[in-house]
Amino acid sequence: MGGGITQLVLKGQMDSYINLKPCINYYKYVYNKHVNFSMENKREDPENNSSINLRLPKATSNKLMTFTLKRYGDLVSNIYLSFNLPDIYSTDVHRFRWVNNVGHNFIKTATVRIEGTTIEEIYGEWMNIWNELTNKDGVEYNKLIGNIPEYISPNNNNSRYVIKNNILYNKIYPSKDKILNAGNPSINGRIIQVPLNFWFTRNPSLSLPLYKIQNQEIKIDIELNDIEKLYQVWCDKLKLYVSPDFFNTIYGLTLSNNNAITIENFIADECYIQSYLDINYIFLDSTYRLNSLQNEGIVKYVVDYVKKQPSKTISIKSSGGTVILEYAYNHIKEIIWVLRRSDIPEKFNIHDNYTASHIYNETMGLLESAQIKWADTIIREDQKAYYYNNIQPYQYHTNVPRTGIYSYSFSLFPEKIITAGSFNNQMTKTSLYFNINNIGNSIKDITKRSEYKYLFELMRRNSVAYIKEDEVNLDVIVYARVINVFSVINGECNLIWNR
């Protein structure tokens, strides 16, 4: 008797738990019939002007675009904000480059409103954080949002120099004026497409049922960040990339004197950003749609979304602080937070560095430890930063993020739409207590380390006005992922717990 047959006749009591009266057959193909449907992507332009003239001062600052979801299909699934970034003409003096995750950082907020009521609001910063925890697409996703070498490090993209007529030229950033170099941009323009991760885009079963919401108008508002926050220029005095505003301060350049560095210095004479939504509409079989309208009545399903807590600012010399989760009135499935130096995004346009150093340094985390309380009851004892930065994400998320992104999950599967664990924050007061990593010797105290002090010493050596080491402030940014119930009845929809 061969080994294959022998394996089948080796039976005992344990087999009753494993393969007696089986429920599945690995060698039988099973399929389910599905409701007939089709999909089509449609472009939706904003109600106000979709063209942003970059030659106007503060062209994108606090720019609000409003889109109305047309009833083109029966449901809405995925939505992308698409916009073009222009050709950039930069010399070797300024070495223009876009910031990391420029697609995310272009967005300040994205809001779904139904009959004027805010249902969900997401943030460009939140997209960066959530991407760190959950993205498994890597290169493909980065290509969508413009986080590519040609944009964020053009100097290191292929060979920087070329020899022509025995002369060494910088082919990325020529020494010529941009007008003389017209037609040969240092950074080529491209279309950026940012997935808007609203609750109804995360699973087909959650698609927004337009055919059932017949009596309400649905709008999406996109508030943009100032484009001057989306790029960096080279400061030869400091040998660092800085924000254009800080560059102007260092060299005494002003708008009133017409010599300040702005985006206008790097674009063609006529330059516009065109923005629109790319919406995936779903069309249902007419028989199913009619049957659904007549027989399903009230439709309710569980959704989750993010709520940003009021920002808090503390000194880097303080021992720590407390954040009360005030804007999360429902069940909470996860708490995610970051600490960030206030001066880094302002002076350097670095928006995703949550370490104590002026550039990302994984050994320079700002958090020492944290604790979570319900009223006076400790539910998560004081744990070191690595627990929230490494262990929690490893257990519950797709990725372990970079240093400085901290999470604590009450759910077994926080990335999924199922309710697999949460707590009712309506019935208690939840507080996050945290301690700053600034106590101890020169190894443990980040404010005594050379990586922290380097920037301030550099400013003093070059006589550049800057804050002192002990004047640094930290922004404490906390997000709660909450659960609610989305209800559709009589042609109208709402969140049952709408606070």
Image (cartoon, rainbow, N blue to C red):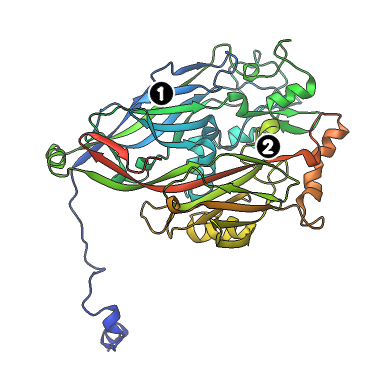
What residue did someone put label 2 on?
Answer: 342
- Note whether 121 is above or below 274 in the view shown: below
User: Is 450 on the left or on the right of 212, as rendered?
Assistant: right
Mark 1 residue crowding within 10 angstroms, few (<14) / some (14–19) / many (20+): many
- Note whether 90 is above or below 311 in the view shown: above
**Spot occupied by residue 164 in the image (x, y as percentages of width and height):** 71, 25
- Note whether 257 is above or below 468 in the view shown: above
Query: Residue at the spot x=21%, y=77% of the render?
Result: 21
Query: Residue at the spot x=69%, y=25% of the render?
Result: 244
Is 24 in front, or is 297?
A: 297
- Estimate the spatial distance between the alpha carbons at disc 1 and disc 2, rounded to whole Å: 30 Å
**Spot occupied by residue 292 in the image (x, y as percentages of width and height):** 16, 42
What residue did someone put label 1 on?
Answer: 66
The answer to which quarter of the image holds residue 114 is top left
User: Is 198 on the left or on the right of 355, as rendered?
Assistant: left
Q: Please say whether residue 138 is visible from this viewpoint.
A: no
Mark 2 residue crowding within 10 angstroms, few (<14) / some (14–19) / many (20+): some
Q: Residue 194: give its label.
A: none
- Identify which amino acid the numbered label 1 is placed on: Thr
- Identify which amino acid the numbered label 2 is placed on: Ser
